[in-house]
Image (cartoon, rainbow, N blue to C red):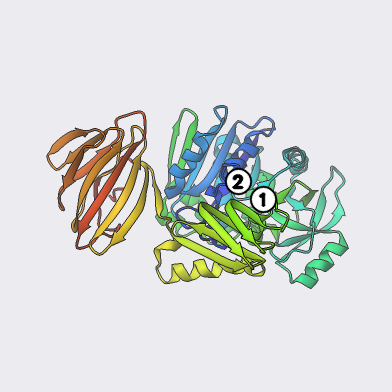
Amino acid sequence: MNLIPVILSGGVGSRLWPTSREAHPKPFMKLADGQTLLQKTFLRAAALPDVTEIITVTNRDLLFKTEDDYRTLDSAHILQSFILEPFGRNTAAAIAIAALHLRDVHGTDAHMLVLAADHLIQDQTAFEQAVLKAVELSDNSWMVTFGIQPSHAETGFGYLEAGQALDKGDGLRVARFVEKPDLQTAAGYLEAGNYFWNSGMFCFQVGTVLDELERHTPDLLAAVAKTIAASRLVEAAGHRCLTLDAPSFDEVNDISFDYAVMEHSERVATIPCSIGWSDVGSWNSISELTAPDDAGNRSNGELLTHNARNNFIQSENRLVALTGVEDLLIVDTPDALLIAHKSCAQDVKHIAQTLKATGHPLHKFHRTVHRPWGTFTTLEEGERYKIKRIVVKPKASLSLQMHHHRSEHWIVVSGMAVVVNDDQTMMLATNESTYIRAGHQHRLQNPGVIDLVMIEVQSGDYVGEDDIVRIEDVYGRVEA
């Protein structure tokens, strides 16, 4: 069958702020079982028959987080391929690049299964059956989308209207795509019976999608081909990575695959399916994944209530107590608290957009920030000082760097550290420390097999994260 799943891992998920942020977007959100949405998508794809390769299209700055997620999975039989974007250009560009790449590697008869990294599908058996039907249809040059049987009148999804049944298989021709409707229109769609939620998942042969891209958006396809020609492909055992050229990719049109191709093509079919699908697009949909108590309250974390009904609470770090309130969404993180009425779940995105527009750091980062070498957590910050907890992965290394405005004091809490401090190199054990003056070149390495945990105390006239000059870096973060 030669089926290659392509996972599109982009977007911020602003309706799920404050958990989803630009540097830690929705696919990396952990659900109650401890798995992220991205991990669930990868495992769902890997479990399909005869799948031996999965392509993930993501931002290049998120590669290390993606690899960390995949590393914990039982996926030794899967070739992990990556297409790394310097910035987002929407789904048409991502699918076009994946299709051209697959044509070069597997030929035009290969089948692409396009999946979103941040969706949840709870019925694997029904999903697999739908995929096999889609592959059968795509052999006849159909562009197949998965239409979700609607369970209620939903205004947060786009719809597709199904037309006549096809001669072969269980597919229906798609008559048209419909934007997110108002409630009355959505109720009409539900009653009509031939409208389905547009899942944003697709299946087609590589040659078919390239023909349709050439027919309906040739300029985009040409710009994507130019980008690939200027990009860098690295292959190793069990791993393939195509890093896109930023100047060329900047010329690619920013448009969705639905708008660019699917709404214009005459070869679009749908497989109606009930697969336990959710786009996990708001805190209301997250809340539905947790069982309610007798008063309708749902909680991920410790909750104490008195005369409180139908609330959702997510708080991993501390007890939340409620009294005399109902129909609230409460999401507590170490550095931000969201309180919203359930009827306003879609409006959370406006909070995230305002934070971004004003340059507030909480639109992008959590208190704990992930880096290729590990994490750092800001414990306290004041005028002229900042205190961090730093965790360095085994065998990992920070860049060789220096700061103009701050000095740093490092104390090892656990593990071993190799420290370069100007012209000195030293080994530090637990409870040992060193002082690094402003202007000194320095580097931190973990030579051990367990995490290195350190406390860093910064002091100086400026302690912002942009006061850093990288001289050498094993993760390619030094500008040429």
Displayed quadrant of residue 342: bottom right
Bin the neighbour count of mark 1 within 10 Å (Cα to Cα): few under 14, some 14-19, many 20 and up.
Answer: some
- The reply, left or right, for residue 170 in relation to residue 64 is right
Whether residue 89 is visible, yes or no, is no
The residue under the point 83% across, 62% down is 190
Quadrant in which the N terminus appears: top right
Residue 402, given in percent of the width and then of the height, sits at 20, 50
Q: Position of residue 317 (x, y in %)?
A: 49, 51
User: Residue flagged by tag 1: what amino acid is it?
Assistant: Thr
Residue topped by disc 1: 290
Q: Secondary structure at mark 1?
A: loop
Question: Given the current orientation, which residue lies at the most extreme front position?
Answer: 306
140 and 424: which one is in front? Answer: 424
Residue at x 76% of width, y 53% of height? 147
The residue tagged 2 is 32
Instruction: Tell me if 295 is positioned left or right of 96 in this view.
Output: right
Query: Within 10 Å of the Cα at label 2, are there few (<14), some (14-19), or many (20+) other Cα atoms?
Result: few
Q: Residue at x 21, y 56 (%)?
A: 459
Upstream in sequence: badge 2 or badge 1:
2
Q: Is residue 180 visible?
A: yes
Q: Quadrant of residue 152?
A: bottom right
Return the residue nearer the eye: 169 or 358.
358
Q: Marks 2/1: CA distance? A: 8 Å
- Horizontal and vertical percent position of residue 351: 52, 69
x then y, percent, for residue 303: 59, 54
Q: Are marks 2 and 1 in contact (CB under 8 Å)?
A: yes
